[in-house]
Amino acid sequence: HNWNVHAFAPGGEVWSSSSPTAVFREHSAGGGVAAEVFERRFANGQGLTLREAAMFAATLESLVHEELTERFQTAMRVTGLRTQASLKDRDVDLLMDAYMVLYLSRMNASATSVEVLESLSKFKTNPYWAPTRKWLREVRREVVVALPADAEKNSAASVVRQLEEASYRYGRYADQECIDLKTDLMQHEGRTPGHVPLSRFYGAALRNGSWQFSESQAFLKQAGALDDSESQTPNVIIPNWIGLPSNCVAGSKFYSVCCINECEALLGQLERHVAAPAAAPGRLVELVEQLTSATVEAPRALSAELIERLEGIAARHSGSVPLHGRLFMQWMHNSFPRECPFPHLAGATRPLGMREFEQETGHRADLERNELAARLQDLEASTVNSGGVSDHVELVGSSRVWSDEEELLMSAQLAPLVDTVQPSALRAAALLFMVVSMLGAMLQTASSARTAALSGTGSSKAAKA
């Protein structure tokens, strides 16, 4: 689904600094119970079995579904529609538009009709809104076609199913905007593939109308999207910039829809072929030379420098290269500079959304047009005065920054898993959570039906008000 689940990523810190169960505690009903049970499995370095990991994912999916239903009820309320056996097609269209506004704006269940309608009017000026509405109708048609012959396509349950499918697919659909941004950035690359001189980055915002490229240097630095190893000529790292939280386009209290990390697919292919936590450097060279990405064709011959780097990593680890270590991911960044982010040391970065950055630092995350022009002038002057490469000269093949600090996701020696929590306890917790969720949904449905019965036919659509 391309969901970045909250608390799953370390946010610039070491992996053990966050707990994936924290996301459950955001739920008021059974989430706390589920979090407590799963947290006991993570205590003392323990993890989950395959079955428990599946239960973990199922619990999260249940929470997300419950939130989707709540958002659906909010969309019904703000549009003035009543819970009834079937809705008209135009009502469903209005309802789905309202739902997408809630989803894209990350509004909660307390959103008012005025807030939603104001956001909807703003979305109508966005060039991506019309294609999004068209895509949403296509998803609806596909779901309706797959319904049983006797199913009502416009019932509340059916519309919820259509919206659920849309939320599952939206991440892949929205990633096209990320691909467009990446393509735009590649047109401004400088001496190093995957790196855009900050002067060109700001130049694109001023001269080409690429308003997304206006983040301040301080924001880019803290987020880990800036290579300032050459202080006079800082560069924006394309895959790190693409993965910024500020590029996330939708979400909920459980997850955000962000740009797809293209490196994960490449690493996934290596994991499937190696089927082990580490591999010999020769084997990895053989596999990587056959990997194709959006910007790298295969087969190819890796450079002697890249092979030497990989062998150096292996020498530090008794002849094998850990696949889930910082040095190997740095090597992947050098091998696929436009797809694989540069892995900063833990604690060196703190990726935040623009609003969070401004609240935490007291500084703006982006620059106004006059500020961009002034900063661009300074950067261009600095490049010339330092004897650096002109912003308008293309050089290819320059060596990239390399640091020898290693960080491993986990140690090579894992202690035997001690089953301090019985599987039956996990099943009981999951069952308890599902029962609580089902009861909540049943009570909410009953309340909605009773309200509809009492309200009669006097309600009107907010859209017509």
Image: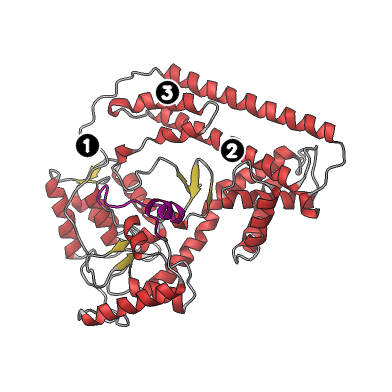
243 or 413: which is nearer to us?
243
Please state the horizontal and vertical placement of residue 186, each as a whole percent of the image: 39, 71
Q: In the picture shown, does residue 361 fall above or below 446?
A: below
| Eye-nearest disc, 3 or 1 | 3
Mark drawn on residue 411: 1
Residue position marked by numbered label 2 in the rendering: 67
73 or 87: which is nearer to us?
73
Of pointers 3 and 1, the one earlier in the residue sequence: 3
Of pointers 3 and 2, the one earlier in the residue sequence: 3
Residue 348 part of the magenta segment:
yes
Mark drawn on residue 396: none
Please state the horizontal and vertical placement of residue 341, each as a whole percent of the image: 33, 57
Amino acid carrying label 2: it is: Glu
- Distance of mark 3 from mark 1, alpha carbons? 25 Å
Amino acid carrying label 3: it is: Val
In-image side of 264 versus 332 (left or right): right
SS of the residue under disc 2: helix
Q: Which residue is rendered at x = 51% and y = 61% of the image?
A: 176
Q: Which residue is rendered at x = 34% and y = 61% of the image?
A: 218
SS of the residue under disc 1: loop
In-image side of 380 versus 282 (left or right): right
